[in-house]
Amino acid sequence: MEHPERPGQTEHPGHTEDELAGLDIPALLRYGLTAAPGPLRTSLFGDGAVGAAVLLDRLDTEPRSVAYLAEVVRAGGVRAAADLPEPLPRPEAAALARDWLEAAASAPQGPAPQGPAPQSPAPQGPAPQSTSTQDPATDDTAARWLHAVATIIEVRRRAGR
């Protein structure tokens, strides 16, 4: 985006779209999703989200498709979304999304709970099926990141980028 007071210069001259699109987004997801607020999380939701949006926008991916994928992640978890045969329309976009979802699914989890597991009575009926191997907070963060990517695509399109 051109700087309003300096024609010909961008507001972030250090990062071109190509540089942002070339970021290692899987690594940003793998380490940023479970990071405490700070530089890793900021990189994921800042440069990483913009880089992902640039890549998907270049593939003509609709923002609503990315927003829908975010809801799938929120409802079923990152692992379930990664296992979808086509997480986004079009093979190139689906391959990108699958790589990102696989990276998110491999994000390191927090420390295991200390002490003995709580005892509860034996459950009656079939055991509930969990669709996620992630901490629900990690799934939620991944869904919020995908929503951010969808929003950035939408803003880029409205701005004529």
Image: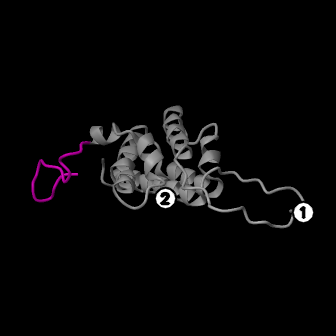
Mark 2: few/some/many CA within 10 Å (<14, 14-19, 20+): some
Q: Residue furthest left?
A: 6
Say whether residue 89 is left or right of residue 155.
right
Residue 99, above or below 65: above
Foreground: disc 2 or disc 1: 1
Amino acid, disc 1: Gln
Amino acid, disc 2: Arg
- Quote the CA–CA distance across marks 2 and 1: 35 Å
In the image, residue 9 lies in the stretch drawn in magenta: yes
Residue 106, above or below 12: above
Residue 115, above or below 160: below
Residue shown at 64% from the left, 57% from the top: 75
Magenta segment boundaries in residue numbering? 1-16
Residue shown at 35% from the left, 49% from the top: 50
From the image, tell me which residue sits under label 1: 124
Residue shown at 28% from the left, 39% from the top: 19
**Label 2 secondary element:** helix
Residue 160 position, x and y percent, is 30, 50
| Disc assigned to residue 144 | 2
